[in-house]
Amino acid sequence: MVVKSDLSMPVVSIIFLLLFGYFVGSIPSGYLAGKWIKGIDLRQYGSGTVSGSMVWEHVAKWAVVPVGLFDIFKGAFPAWLGLRLGMGELAAMLAGFAAIVGHNWSIYLNFQGGRGFSPFLGELLVLFPWGLVIVLAGLAIGNIFQNPIFPLFTVLLLPFFAQFLQDSPIVLWCSLGMTLITLIKRLEANRRPLPADRKERQRTIIRRLLLDRDIQDHEEWIRQEPR
């Protein structure tokens, strides 16, 4: 499906759509699941992100389903609404990105949040359904081998798959945008402080970029609890 951008659409309408996407994306479903089900602040556990993986590890495995579906919806609905209102693919993509930014830096959580992959899946569902399947495969492989590089690498490959499956430059920008957001989120890490020692700080930055964690041991990282 290729929907042409409508450049005659008033800028104010697009701004309202982006704000709507951000505020919808900011609804912290993982955090709320932790509060409602176990009475915990999920940001104090594991990786410190309010992500589905932390809900699975520290809240309840069954809760991953409603949390994941809602987070996917957060990315899909603003993008779909942009198309439905005739704003075009570009506005739809930006609305999906606004939801991802809201998910990662929620106004309701002091600008902390998750990693952004679930709302990104929702955006792909609307703009590039085959991309949804491809990224899910990358997430599955990364989970099997406990290697967080696979999902990021899969996102980078999306434009190449799009050349064969869908002729739209929006997919290229969608992929590059998600890659940039993911790298920024990994480095920022919900404003978790870096070590004071220079060499350890450098190692931590590299681990954040490549492994999405501050220490080498994956199991120890995701099972961290408040001291």
Image (cartoon, grey):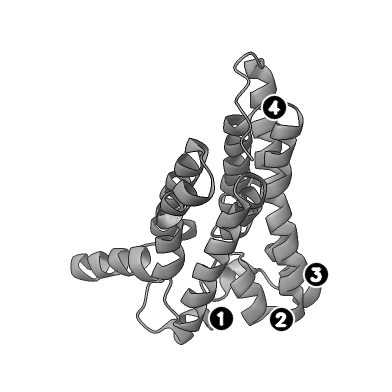
Q: How far apart are the two marked residues, 1 and 2, measured between alpha carbons?
A: 17 Å
Residue 130 x, y percent position in the rendering: 59, 56
Q: Secondary structure at mark 1?
A: loop
Residue kind at label 2, given as amino acid type: Lys
Q: Is residue 111 left or right of residue 173?
A: right
Quarter occupied by residue 11: top right
Q: Is residue 28 left or right of residue 186?
A: right
Residue 209 x, y percent position in the rendering: 35, 63
Residue 73 x, y percent position in the rendering: 73, 53
Q: Secondary structure at mark 2?
A: helix
Mark 1 and mark 2 lie on one chain; the one further toward the N terminus is: 2
Q: How far apart are the two marked residues, 2 and 3, measured between alpha carbons?
A: 14 Å
Residue kind at label 3, given as amino acid type: Trp
Label placed on residue 16: 4
Residue under pointer 3:
36
Residue under pointer 2:
61
Quarter occupied by residue 132: bottom right
Residues tagged 4 and 2 counted as in contact (Cβ below 8 A): no
Label placed on residue 151: none
Is residue 39 visible in the rendered image? The answer is no
Residues tagged 1 and 2 counted as in contact (Cβ below 8 A): no
